[in-house]
Image (cartoon, grey):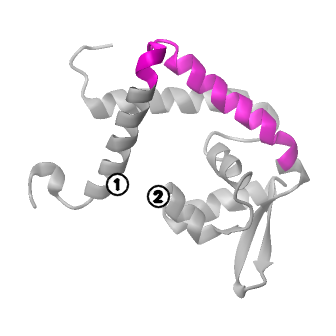
Amino acid sequence: MHPDMPLGALISVIHRNHIIALNTRLRPLGLSASQLPILLFLSHREGIPQEALARHFHLDKATIARAVKRLEDGGFICRKIDPADRRAYGLFLTGKGTEVRDDLRVIDAAWERALLSVVPETNRPVLIRLLRALAEHSIAIAGTGREHGCD
């Protein structure tokens, strides 16, 4: 790896390899890497509306709608009308979604453990805190022009 590779490229390499590794492990379950975070989130927040899911993952409604449709078509989730707002649908794991939940957690944790194995254990909390700060700040500055010093 080139020592002058910019931060964005480094993050991109990690992300691409994360997707490749997850897809390899999830394919036998009939899932893809893009579906994993949604299923893991729903495993502890069942009933959440699709719009709230889009906000949580900082994705547009169309992207979430496609992902939800694929998960629904695959039998992993279902939509149920929200009794409090009959125009809204809550998302729930099906029996099939519940069956794979523990496997998904193991797959996700194994990737994180393998990736972090090159970072001394005492530095891991600091690394994660810094990455979280960068992620949150990237959301805050996206599209504002501030990344170029234009306030």
Q: Which type of secondary structure does the marked residue at label 1 adopt?
A: helix
Magenta region, mostly helix, strand or loop?
helix
Where 110 sits versus 26, above or below? above
Q: Residues within 10 Å of mark 1 (few under 14, many from 20)?
A: few
User: At label 2, which amino acid type do we have?
Assistant: His
Q: Residues within 10 Å of mark 2 (few under 14, many from 20)?
A: few
Q: Does the segment drawn in magenta span residue 92?
A: no
Where 118 sits versus 5, above or below? above
Answer with left or right where residue 53 lies relative to residue 68: left
Q: Which residue is mark 1?
A: 139
Q: Does the segment drawn in magenta span residue 103?
A: yes
Q: Which residue is mark 2?
A: 58
Q: Which residues are magenta?
A: 98-124
Towards the viewer: 139 or 32: 139
| Dot 2 or dot 1, earlier in sequence | 2
Of the 4 image quadrants, the one containing the N terminus is top left
Towards the viewer: 85 or 62: 85
Answer with left or right where residue 134 lies relative to residue 37: left
Of the 4 image quadrants, the one containing the C terminus is bottom left
Where 143 sits versus 108, above or below? below
Residue 70 sits in quarter: bottom right
Answer with left or right where residue 141 lies relative to residue 39: left
- Extreme residue toward the left, this view: 150
Kindly indicate whether the residue at mark 1 contacts the one at mark 2 (C-beta within 8 angstroms): yes
Residue 101 place in picture, x, y as percent: 79, 42
The residue drawn where x is 70% and y is 86% is 85
Residue 146 place in picture, x, y as percent: 16, 55
